[in-house]
Image: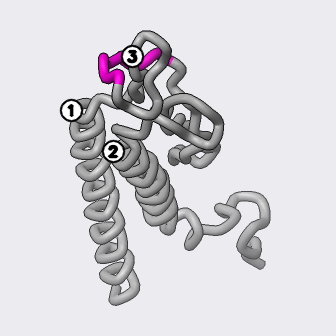
């Protein structure tokens, strides 16, 4: 009698192994979606000089981590603690005693480049997802 699926000598779940590329590319799209959200937040707050925590807005950065199945996930969002620049504007409500306003540490050019990269990686993952889906459909037809 042949070994049942999952017994010694057989892959535990052969169909599940075929779905691996879908999961990996889906996880990549999710991670890039999170990155796009954070980059958008940075751009929206590029001129925010006062936050509820006090002081100017601090740039956020997504930290990616490799998963056990070979994919990637956005594991956390951290605050970039590098100082922003200062601008002399004594009439600004957030100016200090010397007339300087502390600005956020957000560089629009850096954010736009990060946005372009995240979008292209997201698009690449979507292409992989569509290709894997098409291959699975063809395999079902065999």
Q: Measured from the top left, where is residue 1 in percent x and y? A: 77, 78
Which residue shows up at 78% across the image and 65% down it?
Answer: 7
The part of the image, by quadrant, that contains residue 115 is top left
**Structural distance between the alpha carbons of marks 3 and 1:** 24 Å
Specify the segment rendered in magenta.
82-90
Which residue shows up at 75% across the image and 67% down it?
Answer: 6
In the picture shown, does residue 84 fall above or below 37? above
**Structural distance between the alpha carbons of marks 1 and 2:** 10 Å
- Label disc, if present, on residue 43 of the rendered structure: 2
Which residue shows up at 35% across the image and 66% down it?
Answer: 129
Camera-side residue: 33 or 125?
Answer: 33
Give the residue number, with chain letter if any, for mark 3: 100
Secondary structure state at the residue bearing disc 3: strand
Give the residue number, with chain letter if any, for mark 1: 109
Give the prevailing secondary structure in the magenta stretch. loop
Tag 3 or tag 2, which sits nearer the N-term?
2
In what quadrant of the picture does the C terminus appear?
A: bottom left
Q: Is residue 66 visible?
A: no
Nearer to us of marks 3 and 1 is: 3
Image marks 3 and 1: residues in contact by CB distance under 8 Å: no
In the picture shown, does residue 94 fall above or below 41? above
Camera-side residue: 28 or 3?
Answer: 28
Residue neighbourhood size for the residue with mark 1, other residues' Cα within 10 Å, grouped as few (<14), some (14–19), many (≥20): few
Q: Measured from the top left, where is residue 50 in percent x and y? A: 51, 37
Residue neighbourhood size for the residue with mark 2, other residues' Cα within 10 Å, grouped as few (<14), some (14–19), many (≥20): some
Q: Measured from the top left, where is residue 107 in percent x and y? A: 29, 29
For this view, does 124 lie left or right of residue 74? left
**Structural distance between the alpha carbons of marks 2 and 3:** 22 Å
């Amino acid at each position: 009698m042949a070994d049942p699926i999952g017994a010694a000598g057989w892959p535990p779940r052969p169909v599940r192994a075929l779905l691996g590329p879908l999961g990996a590319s889906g996880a990549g799209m999710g991670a890039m979606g999170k990155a796009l959200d954070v980059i958008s937040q940075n751009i929206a707050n590029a001129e925010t000089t006062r936050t509820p925590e006090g002081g100017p807005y601090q740039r956020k950065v997504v930290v990616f981590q490799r998963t056990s199945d070979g994919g990637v996930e956005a594991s956390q969002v951290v605050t970039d603690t590098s100082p922003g620049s200062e601008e002399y504007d004594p009439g600004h409500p957030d100016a200090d005693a010397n007339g300087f306003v502390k600005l956020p540490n957000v560089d629009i050019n850096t954010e736009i480049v990060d946005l372009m990269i995240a979008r292209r990686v997201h698009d690449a993952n979507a292409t992989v997802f569509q290709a894997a889906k098409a291959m699975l459909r063809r395999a079902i037809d065999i």
